[in-house]
Image (cartoon, rainbow, N blue to C red):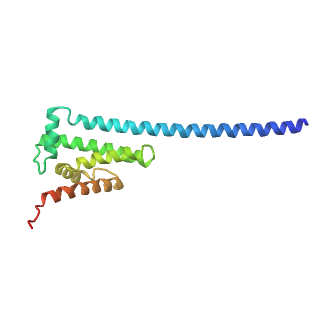
Amino acid sequence: MTVEVLYYLSQIVAVIVIVATLLAILWQGYQTNKIARADLTLSMWMQAGAMNQSLVDSTDKAAFMTRVFKPNAQLTPEDEMRLTFQMYTQIGIFQAAYNLHGRGLIETSAYDLCAAGVRAFLTSDAARRWWRMRRTDGYASKFQAIIDKLAEEAERPAASAATPEKAP
């Protein structure tokens, strides 16, 4: 073998090593993104769970939530204020999940869990009233449409439960 052939072989080996290194870096980036996505998903679940648990971790809070979910409940001004902050928090958590999911940064299951949390809140007449009054508070139209749909879905069972059945 001539020196020139050895030189060309060494260049080929160098290119193969560089390509293999780049592929390894790409694979490592892919794995890191999967880990970060899993971590964000877990964080979303943990924060939503802790926030929801904090809603009923005392007798006073549980009584408030009971009033909120009581059909046609008349809430005090203090209850309305608490509900406002609870709803902004619930909607905010779901909006964060919506944005993260839209960017592919959390799993669909975490997004769905947050949607279920909002859907559960919207089974309350008071929460739906709150949403109708606050829906234009700067929410993006696509996100607003999702909440509107959740509110509509939550209202259907409430409306059918309020309608008395006819006797045969």
Instruction: Work out which quarter of the rendered image holds the N terminus and state it.
Output: top right
| x then y, percent, for residue 121 | 23, 47
Give the residue furthest to the top: 58
Q: Is residue 114 left or right of residue 20?
A: left
| x then y, percent, for residue 38 | 44, 38
| x then y, percent, for residue 96 | 36, 44
Instruction: Using the image as rendered, state which of residue 145 and residue 108 is in the foreground.
Output: 108
Quarter of the image where one finds residue 84: top left
Task: Examine the rendered structure and indicate whether residue 110 appears above or below residue 167.
Answer: above
Give the residue furthest to the left: 167
**Residue drawn 40% across and 47% down?**
108
- In the rendered image, is residue 94 in sight? no
Instruction: Work out which quarter of the rendered image holds the C terminus and state it.
Output: bottom left
**Residue drawn 16% across and 45% down?**
68
**Residue drawn 91% across and 36% down?**
2
Task: Examine the rendered structure and indicate whether residue 155 appears above or below residue 32.
Answer: below
- In the rendered image, is residue 132 in sight? yes
Q: Is residue 21 left or right of residue 122?
A: right
| x then y, percent, for residue 3 | 89, 35
Quarter of the image where one finds residue 17: top right
Give the residue furthest to the right: 2
